[in-house]
Image (cartoon, helix red, strand yellow):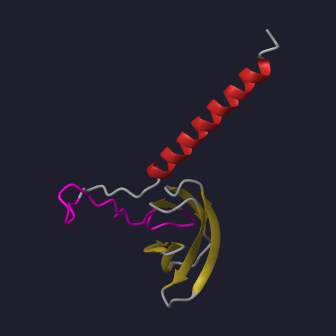
């Protein structure tokens, strides 16, 4: 029973290695950007595979008093800079946040004077800015 074990182990390791290679190859194809609307190219049998999804930001409640939730969409996982800018363009607050999947909620507590501000979320070529009213 155990005399054949090294041979079986070697065979199992080869199978596992082949499965891993297949998974990695398939994963490379699934990470290609895919267009939500298939657009024909000059070749009638090919379709465009570009991604047209733009980053988005929703702020609620707006107007707010001291707590806001920033709902970010279509960002990449990783660090994002969150900036609070006053109506004159002066940077009032800056914070770096880790986005785990790129579409999520960020809660911020703000102790700001009443007025109009802008919240800007940016990350490597992606920038979104929305107006925020503080009561």
- Picture quarter with the N terminus: top right
In the depicted view, which residue is nearer to us: 48 or 116?
48
- Determine whether 49 is above or below 7 in the image: below
Decide: is 2 above or below 77: above
Tell me what residue is drawn at x 57 percent, y 66 percent. 66
Which residue extends farthest top?
1
Quadrant for residue 62, please give it.
bottom left
Q: In the rendered structure, which segment of residues is drawn in magenta?
A: 39-68
Q: Does residue 10 appear left or right of residue 32 in this picture?
A: right
Q: Magenta includes 1? A: no
Nearer to us in this view, 129 or 135: 129
Residue 62 is one of the magenta-drawn residues: yes
Q: Can you give x and y, in whole percent of width and height, for residue 120 in the image?
A: 50, 75
Task: Kindly identify the residue that appears in the image at 57 percent across and 72 percent down.
Answer: 82
Name the residue at 73% across, 28% down. 10
- Picture quadrant where residue 49 is located: bottom left
Q: Closer to the camera, 38 or 96?
A: 38
Estimate the x, y position of residue 94 in percent, counting from the top left. Answer: 63, 76
- On the image, the x and y values in percent for residue 55 come to 42, 66
Which residue: 51% across, 47% down?
25
**Direction right: furthest residue:** 3
């Amino acid at each position: 029973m155990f005399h054949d074990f090294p041979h079986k182990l070697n065979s199992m390791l080869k199978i596992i290695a082949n499965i891993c290679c297949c998974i990695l190859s398939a994963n490379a194809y699934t990470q290609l950007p895919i267009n939500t609307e298939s657009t024909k190219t000059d070749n009638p049998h090919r379709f465009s595979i570009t991604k047209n999804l733009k980053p988005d930001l929703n702020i609620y409640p707006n107007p707010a008093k001291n707590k806001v939730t920033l709902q970010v969409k279509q960002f990449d996982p990783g660090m994002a800079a969150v900036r609070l800018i006053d109506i004159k363009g002066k940077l009032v607050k800056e914070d770096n946040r880790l986005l785990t999947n790129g579409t999520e909620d960020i809660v911020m507590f703000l102790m700001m004077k009443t007025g109009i501000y802008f919240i800007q979320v940016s990350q490597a070529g992606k920038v979104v800015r929305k107006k925020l009213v503080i009561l």
